[in-house]
Image (cartoon, helix red, strand yellow):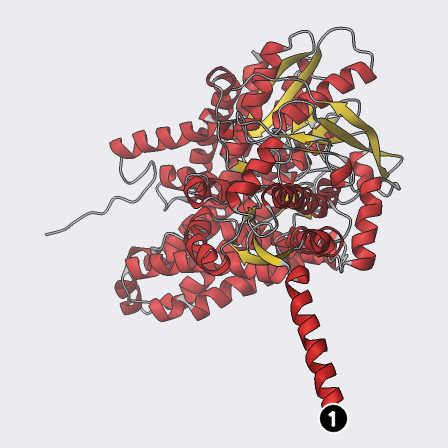
Amino acid sequence: MSEVLNYMINGALVGLLYSLVAMGFVVIYRASKVFNFAQGELVVFGGFLVWWMVVSLGLPLWIGLPLAFVLAALFGLLIERIFFSRLVGESVFAMVMVTIGLLILMRGLILLLFGPQVRPFPIIFPLQPVIIGDILIPRALLIGGIITTVVGFALSWFFNKTRPGLKLTAVAEDHQVAISMGISVKRSVAFAWVLGSVLSTLGAIIYLSGKSLSFLASEIGIAALPVALLAGFESIAGVLLAGIIVGTIQGLVTAYLDPVVGGSVGMVFPMIVMLLILFIRPTGMFGWKTVERV
Amino acid sequence: MNFFRKWAFASAAAVALAAPAQADTTYNIASLADFTGPYADVMKDLAGSRHSAVAWWNAEVGKELGVTLAIKDYDHRYDAAQVASLWPGIKAELNPIIALGVGAPDATALAGRLPSDGIPLIMSTAGYGFGWKPDPWVFNPRATYAHEAAAFFEWYRKEKGIEGPLKIAVITSEASPAYVDIGKGIEKYAHGATDQVELVEMVFTEVQPTDLTTQLNRVLKKGAQVIDVQTNTAAVVAAKRALQALGRSDVPIVMSSHNGITASARALGGMAELEGDYEVYGMAMPTDEATEPKKFYDKLKADYAMQGAWTVPTVMGLNQTLVALRAIEAAAKKVGPDKVTGQAVRDALLSNTITSAQTFGVLSDVTYTNEAPFPTSGITVNVGTVKDGKYVTAADGVAVPTIEKW
């Protein structure tokens, strides 16, 4: 029984890590209706910023990490200024295509700036796991899970209760309507990219603490995709729940089905669950329902 | 004036007559490389060692034979589609008698067409079970990763005086067919050598694992005594961090060449992190010890403009190039220096043993048969480790056991 609980807890914590990355998808989608294909690359870029500050420049964590966040925010702003500020009012398809271009561009940029070598990522959180009886919890994932939950609820409150957050929500509804209400769509989209980039850097810190960093780390973007889709792309708090569901299923399947089947069923199973749910409810669990008035 | 004219004419005639005896036949080698893809960071070493080995051969072997070799690099970005699109141009431009590959994309893109093109391809890596087919045109200088791991398991078990079978766990991934093949090979070996090893679990994970603490805790509870990670450095780092988190420094990780001690230590932040861990492969280890391969490397560095440092990629470049050069040498001796073709080189590969002495100890004796694209018997591996923070050889010349085809 404790073994099952162990896999469930660890799975849920991994799922919360996916939620954090998925929040990057959601905040950008909410502001611009754009599904950002380059989300994984944003995580890698954020990871390299941390590596640059802490390992390469040798700055202490308390200086290096805030600086990495500032640079990530500036990078998010730069992306919006160069690409998306010019696309306000254009079709969603055009913007999605730009994110695919951004993915390719960022891969090249990362290789150009940092090279293809595998780099040691600093140990941000202690390695020693938390042991409760027979249950073993990796400390980085536990702290990451707490941070993700706090960030998730804070963002949810921001988007649903504060004036600037509600403005962003209005932008997510319809760009033209938001403009007619005097809301700056460009500023909202820029804020979303800054937030998305900062969240990705936070995701990189939790994901990579004590491990290694290369452009392969962008795979977490794919792993987070079913979480964002399952939540419905619009609800931040929903992403937390979707992450826990996906992570727990993945943890149990990896533990009990993988050794029997002899393959990565754990990686495929969340996708199957996600597809099943989307067949029943295409907007995801917490996606907005559009009310058509005639 | 007349005298000088006669003298000049006579001299010119003498040079002209002597010329055919001195003229070398030039053949081309296609060097497939990855200067802009995932292996760009190690390609300077790998490609550099190819070039200097060819320069050495031209000066010290080819000159006597009447053969000169030219080598040209083609950047394929480690991409099978790029290899396939480049290949017709390479053939038209170079008409090579042999090609040197980097990894799976070369083999994948070219294996089907090399027999009709009549050009053998020599890889720099260990072999794969899925390539274990008769009548090969793609050759690996080493046996499969599974063969190399099996040799390590048997050596380690004996070294540690373990009575029963050695309990092993394999960390692998379905991200690449090569990684899956490593697992399958070890599984096959374990089934046939129950007195030697017990595979407690094959852990499948992502190519960049999120966290392996739970998985490692599980396999350690099952009694795993060695963790095999022959996929990539990210997996080695994740496995090491999990072992450190669990406070288990008594269970070593065994790696291969491409994700070996030096590469993984860089990714972990220092050699000391891998104290007591191992790497295993069937070629020379680039330690600081004064070995024959190191002496050969030093010679290439001093006399033949070796660009690469003394690293695993350099040794990989050397191993494939030396096999190619010795095969060309054997072909030239057999068919004549002016009649060497790709087919003749392949025939030479299949009918001659390339001795360890011929490769200056970079490889053990290599004998190919028509049954496999890699040597399957009579081969040995070397084992490297970190002792007191220093990268050293733990064992050399360890025999590779026989594994049935999988």
State the residue position of label 1: B1
Q: Residue B394 location, x and y as percent?
A: 83, 29
Left or right of A97: which side holds A7?
Answer: right
Question: Compared to A62, does A261 lie above or below?
Answer: above
Q: Chain of mark 1?
A: B
Whether residue A229 is visible here, answered yes or no, is yes
Q: Residue furthest bottom?
A: B1
Please tell me which residue is depicted at 63% across the width and 63% down the height of the picture.
B20
Q: How many marks?
A: 1
Q: Residue A246 location, x and y as percent?
A: 44, 31
**Hey, which quadrant is residue B204 in on the image?**
top right
Q: Residue A209 location, x and y as percent?
A: 66, 42
Q: Rate crowding at label 1 as few (under 14), some (14 to 19) or many (20 or more) other CA atoms within 10 Å.
A: few
Quadrant assignment for the N terminus of chain B = bottom right
Q: Residue B294 location, x and y as percent?
A: 82, 45
Please tell me which residue is depicted at 64% across the width and 33% down the height of the picture.
B352
Question: Compared to B70, does B358 lie above or below?
Answer: above
Amino acid, disc 1: Met
Q: Which of the two residues, B12 or B33, is positioned nearer the viewer here?
A: B12
Please tell me which residue is depicted at 46% across the width and 35% down the height of the picture.
A243
Q: Secondary structure at mark 1?
A: loop
**Hey, which quadrant is residue B292 in on the image?**
top right
Q: Which of the two residues, A284 or B244, is positioned nearer the viewer here?
A: B244
Whether residue A20 is visible here, answered yes or no, is no
Q: Which of the two residues, B174 or A75, is positioned nearer the viewer here?
A: B174
